Image (cartoon, rainbow, N blue to C red):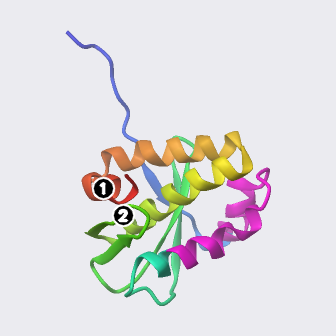
Amino acid sequence: MNNSTECAVTMTLVPDEQRLDFWINHFGSVKGWSTFEVVIFTTMGQFCEDYHGGYWEYCTLSNGGAFIYPDLPQETLTLFNPHNGNEANVSCEAAGIAVCLMMYSLWSFQTESNILVDRFYQLRDYAAQHPERSAIFHLID
């Protein structure tokens, strides 16, 4: 019999008045943190032909994690990962999760930052319970 209780990781949208502090609050001790946002935007453009900029939602997770996703009118986006050849149709939120996971992983190796390792696993835990988890993990595999 398994008596362990797993708690769901929940996501909260960051209110407008707290957006300015989002990056420094969650990544401020990481070398190069000030470039993260623009690199995520650029990477989304490289992975999604239909992405041409737009408003992004900033999100925090109940486990301490954080990520962003594009708030676009399309219900689904087609992402193609040129590094592994995988493609998936996903919601805007799932697209942001996938791109952030890839970038957090890459940056964790480049910066040797434990903060980025933590942010990767916090977001991965959220992704693992997401309705689109199969597509997200297919993209980042």
Around disc 2, counting alpha carbons within 10 Å, would you say few (fewer than 14), some (14 to 19), or many (20 or more)?
many
Look at 27% across and 59% down and name the residue there: 135
**Relative to residue 38, is residue 135 drawn left or right?**
left
User: Are the residues tagged 2 and 1 within 8 Å (C-beta)?
Assistant: no
Residue 87 percent across, percent down from the top left: 29, 68
Q: Is residue 21 magenta?
A: yes
Residue under circle 2?
Answer: 94
Residue 49 drawn above or below residue 57? below
Residue 62 appears in view: no
Look at 56% across and 54% down and name the residue there: 66
Disc 2 marks a residue whose amino acid type is Ala
| Of residues 78 and 122, the one drawn nearer to the viewer in this rendering | 78
Residue 128 drawn above or below residue 79? above
Around disc 1, counting alpha carbons within 10 Å, would you say few (fewer than 14), some (14 to 19), or many (20 or more)?
some
State the quadrant of the N terminus. top left
Residue 123 appears in view: yes
Residue 24 percent across, percent down from the top left: 75, 59
Residue 125 percent across, percent down from the top left: 42, 42
Residue 13 drawn above or below residue 26? below
Residue 138's disc number: 1
Circle 1 sits in a helix, a strand or a loop, which is it? helix
Residue at the top extreme? 1
Residue 35 percent across, percent down from the top left: 72, 70
| Of residues 120 and 17, the one drawn nearer to the viewer in this rendering | 120
Circle 2 sits in a helix, a strand or a loop, which is it? helix
Specify start and end residues of the magenta stretch as a single range: 18-43
